[in-house]
Amino acid sequence: MSTLKYENVWTDKNVYSDAEKNYYESLNKSQNAHMVAGSSLASEVAKARQRIKDSIECMDSIVTLAGVPNTEVNNKLKQIEQENGDLKKALDDLRKLVISLQTRVETLEAAGTSKSLTSKPAVQIKKDDQESDDGVDLFGSDDDEEETAEAAKLREERLAAYNAKKAKKPVLIAKSNIILDVKPWDDETDMAELEKSVRAINTDGLLWGAAKLVPLAYGIRKLQISCVVEDDKVSIDWLTEEIEKIEDFVQSVDIAAFNKV
């Protein structure tokens, strides 16, 4: 007892208890780790064995299938071979038919050529006979002359009727409606005399229409007058030149509107 009084194991019991606890916990962890590693390795080995077994079974099934004939595939191949044979036979028949038709066409063409060659001399002989007979009129040609005269008369009557019908048809005359702007020199120009002078221009195919005075500027007014002209008889250039010849009243002439009637 005297020797143990100097030991402090009993006073530091908690420290020794914790140290002992930590030691056993660490020992337990290392054992668990070894067990887990061993179990995982064992599972991987088991998986590898299962894969090898599955592969061997798959190869066995393939070998079994390869050794057993496939009835469906064989039937399909036989059907294809039969269809191929039928198509080949049909193609041969068509080829023979085309050859026979070609031979027949060549025969017909040869026969037609020979027939045309043999018919030409006969036509020539007949034509020569007709020409030789023309020199000798056994029955007279009065009937032929009468028929020719009647045909000519009938043709002339039809031509006369056609020309008469064409003459009765009204001819379309092309006309134009024109509005002219006639400008005076100044505001002192007598617009009444100007209009009178313009209307004095007269020719075949010219018809004057309404007129009015339109203001311009600074008290100057222009004469706006309309007319209808036949295109084949009256030229627009000629008409404007004739109006511009009235130099005492007219400064210029412009075309305000131009429409076909």
Image: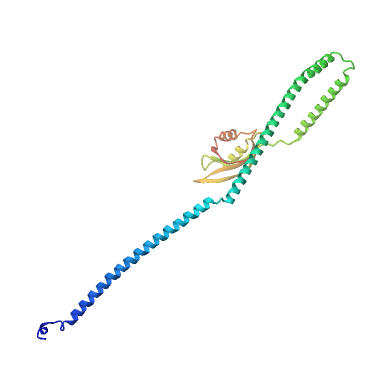
x and y percent of residue 194 in the render?
58, 39
Relative to 91, 166 lies left or right: right
Nearest the eye: 194 or 96 = 96
Nearest the eye: 30 or 155 = 30
x and y percent of residue 15 in the render?
18, 79
Q: Quadrant of residue 40?
A: bottom left
Q: Quadrant of residue 209?
A: top right
x and y percent of residue 205 in the render?
66, 35
Look at the picture and state if 94 lies above or below 44: above
x and y percent of residue 166 in the render?
75, 33
The N terminus, quarter of image: bottom left
Nearest the eye: 127 or 153 = 127
| Residue 144 in view | yes
Q: Residue at x 48, y 55 (%)?
A: 60
Q: Residue lying furthest bottom in this view?
A: 1
Look at the picture and state if 206 lies above or below 27: above
- Counting every numbered tag in the picture gives 0
Q: Residue lying furthest right in this view?
A: 139
Relative to 143, 190 lies left or right: left
Q: Residue at x 73, y 23 (%)?
A: 113
Q: Quadrant of residue 136?
A: top right
Relative to 156, 23 lies left or right: left
The C terminus, quarter of image: top right
Q: Residue at x 66, y 38 (%)?
A: 89
Nearest the eye: 96 or 15 = 15
